[in-house]
Image: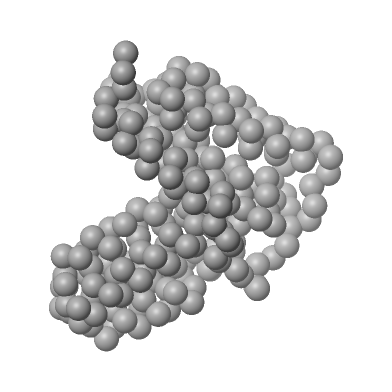
Amino acid sequence: DALPIWIVCAGIAIAVMFALLMTAGCAIQSDGAERAEMPDREQRQKLNLLDETAEEMYQLIRKGDVGEARSKLLALGSQVTHLRFEGLTTVEGLNAFTGLLSEAQKIYNAAQFSQEQGLVAAAKIRLAADALAHKDQPMWRQYGRVLLSDLNRLSESSGKGDANQAAGAFGALSQHYEMVRPSLVISRQPAEVEKADSLLTALKQETEIARMPSERMARLIDELHRT
């Protein structure tokens, strides 16, 4: 049977996102990031397997194969228990990854499964597993191009005094940020993520006030660009 059109559209949207991730240049750099110790051979094999399983889960749910995608999710849950996270990420990073798995299990075991939510959950897990397996060049870095585009739209619309367009631009920015946030927690120090979270919260408040143009919003956008 053919998949419903909204499922197809959701799959296309997520696929486009990953096409951007694979082709775009690195847009986010952090001179202050701490370099983790290199994992040993056994650890590297386990990380590669985790990464491959996450990719398989993502591809399966894109095709609408919920049963097999759920099996891959169970495999991820088993694999993560055999990983040593010391040197890979912080305690916050570990919690972020296991939290994604728990969230996905609720979605995939729901009485009424949501294909759209399943796609988003699989995409987040895919990025997070990649962040663990590829500390030097994680895919989420390349997503900075998308986030900066959202910020530019927000800056332009707020400068024109268009509250509706600004709200839409902020909505896109928030959605895209939430997609990569678990990967940021895995790869960066908590203070860096907390700063980005705080700036986004402040920007949300500004868009809700809808008093544009706003000097405070302009300052917040500039600071988030730098962050």
| Residue nearest the observer in this picture, 192 or 136 | 136
- Which residue sits at x=72%, y=41%? 84
> Where's residue 154, x and y in %?
29, 70
Residue 103 can be seen, yes or no: no
From the viewer's perspective, is residue 226 above or below residue 167?
A: below
> Where's residue 14, x and y in %?
41, 41
Furthest-front residue in view?
A: 23
From the viewer's perspective, is residue 124 above or below residue 76?
A: below
Query: Is 218 positioned to the left or the right of 147 in the image?
Result: left
Query: Is 93 positioned to the left or the right of 222 in the image?
Result: right
From the viewer's perspective, is residue 208 above or below residue 137?
A: below
Residue 72 can be seen, yes or no: yes
From the viewer's perspective, is residue 126 above or below residue 142?
A: above
Quarter of the image for the N terminus: give it.
top left
> Where's residue 202, x and y in %?
31, 72
| Residue nearest the observer in this picture, 64 or 2 | 2
Furthest-right residue in view?
A: 41
- Which residue sits at x=27%, y=67%? 204
- Which residue sits at x=23%, y=68%? 166
- Which residue sits at x=36%, y=64%? 150
